[in-house]
Amino acid sequence: MNPILQALTDAVGKDYVSDQPEEMYFYARDPGLMPPHRPDYVVVPKTVEEIQAVVRLAHREKIPIVPMGAGMALTGLVIPLKGGIVLDMKRMNRILEVNEKARCALVEGGTSQGFLKAYLDGHHPRLRHSIPDSPGTATIAANLMIHGQGRLTQQYGFNSDMVSGLEVVLPSGELCRIGSCAVSPDWFSKGAPLPDLSGLFLGWFGATGVLTKIAVKLYPKKKLRDVEIFLTDREELVPAMVYELTHTEMVEDINVFAQPKPLIFAGNHHIALFFTGDTDEELEFKRKLIWHALDPFIKSKDGGFMGIPPVMKPTLLDMPQRSVSRFADVKRGGGFEYSGPIILVDKYPQCTRKIVELAAKYDLGYSGMARIIGRGHCMMYGFAFTFNRADPDMMERTRKALHEVSEFALQIGGVFWKPTVEEQQMALEKMDPNTRALMKMIKQNLDPLGIMNPGNWEVA
Ligand SMILES: Cc1cc2nc3c(=O)[nH]c(=O)nc-3n(C[C@H](O)[C@H](O)[C@H](O)COP(=O)(O)OP(=O)(O)OC[C@H]3O[C@@H](n4cnc5c(N)ncnc54)[C@H](O)[C@@H]3O)c2cc1C
């Protein structure tokens, strides 16, 4: 056996390491559009000590190492661009503690969104976390790494704003605690009142360390949840509508979508509003305020509420929402990819016109979707295109359309979300040079050998 494989076997056990071609095939790719690249090894550790042993080996031998959750980020962030070791986190999936009164959950670095949701539903029915619409297997750690957004984002910001502590294996193999847990046994803050060091890790795509424990904030889960859809064909009015809605502070989540299919959706922008209550009275009170906020647009005949057919409601209220992957017909080999810049809400009309233009230019199916972040502080505008994996020409057209989206997004003031390596370089090029130098300093100090998820956030 080659000595690296032997050392990895010693670290995690023979059943949890592989260099076999059939496994390398799968770990070479993600479900998005990026070209594959094979790793040399895959390991699936169970403990923090095993991760430390693997990272120390990688450090000693200068082998690249790529942490991986479920591989659902879609933009190639887990593709081992320079080979090396893929560190599959799926066995680190324990929920270590839920503090009901402090509304906090402490989980391991490979715990999935679906697992935490199911656990809370079963054991703490009055608590919930900000679950994204990715498949339930997607991990909490990875979603924080990419500053994801979930069902509570309109109220509380990015999911990574809802963190209250981290444990990290540094690229040297040392273990480090970030936040209140560095001083106290309690995990209640990722920074304040200390200097907030969580920014050395969150958003870096594993290029500065491996998250092994995360404390996430939980929020009240009300007994009832409902959805309304407001329709308008006036895209230029969508920002004003969102402004009025966020002013009510009554809405849990706001998603705006516009797509030509199915036909029932064609020609309109749909503002989906989710709200909750412990009683019918609370729900109706919120509904009234929401209706009232949009009343002027109804009176001016610029929009109206859509009667949601009862069969559609469960789909809309689903968490995570499965309709996203249905739209791409994934089961029959279809795929979808989206570039989602974070951008001001008043850029909605420009974004929506651009997606229509690109879909026509490249002959692609599309869905434009905006998730409001904070009380209208910004939004994630997803330019999503569908493709048929068996059609290389269509895949190429999708790539070209997404490249145009990237250029457009930067040009109108957007900042890429979960950027591909190419987009990371575009962002670094546009970045204030002193900020870029600071990023370089951080990366070089934490990972002087450049072994952590190489290619990502590499500052030349
Ligand atoms: C149908 C669909 C819907 C989606 N909807 C949403 C949505 O509503 N909101 C949203 O935010 N996203 C969404 N996504 C995007 C993405 O799936 C999620 O953000 C998801 O949380 C990513 O988790 P993952 O485990 O698949 O990440 P991965 O792709 O495995 O990893 C992402 C990044 O995190 C790094 N990483 C993983 N684990 C660790 C660790 N323990 N330590 C250090 N680095 C690590 C990886 O190296 C990589 O850089 C959606 C995706 C799909 C396919």
Image: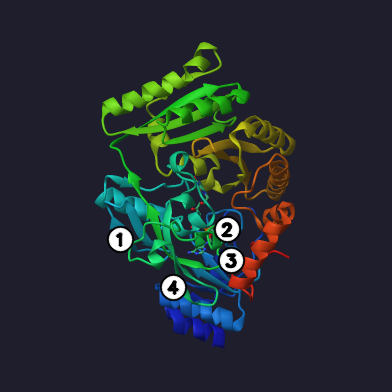
Q: How crowded is mark 1: few (under 14 residues within 10 Å), some or many (20 or more)?
A: few
Disc 2 residue: CB within 8 Å of ligand 1: yes
Q: How many labels does the image show?
A: 4
Q: Mark 4 points at which residue?
A: 45
Chain-order first, disc 4 or disc 1: 4
Residue under the point 54% across and 38% down: 377
* Label 2 vs 4, first from the N-terminus: 2
Disc number placed over residue 207 in the picture, else none: 3
Vertical comparison of 208 with 174: above or below: above
Q: Is residue 187 left or right of residue 237?
A: left
Mark 4: secondary structure: loop
Give residue 380's quadrant in the image. Answer: top right
Question: SS for tag 1?
Answer: strand
Please tell me which residue lies in front, 103 or 33: 103
Under circle 3, the secondary element is loop
Residue type, label 2: Asp
Category of crowding for the residue at label 4, using alpha-carbon neighbours closer than 10 angstroms: few (below 14), some (14–19), many (at least 20): many
Q: Which of marks 2 and 3 is in front?
A: 3
Name the residue type under label 1. Answer: Glu
Determine the CA span between mark 2 and mark 4.
Answer: 20 Å
Q: Which of marks 1 and 2 is nearer the N terminus?
A: 2
Q: Which residue lies furthest to the front in this view?
A: 193
Residue type, label 3: Ala
Residue of label 1: 97
Few, some or many residues within 10 Å of mark 2 (<14, 14–19, 20+)? many
Residue 43, image x and y in percent?
49, 73
Residue 312 or residue 212, whichever sits in front: 212
The residue at which mark 2 appears reads as 30
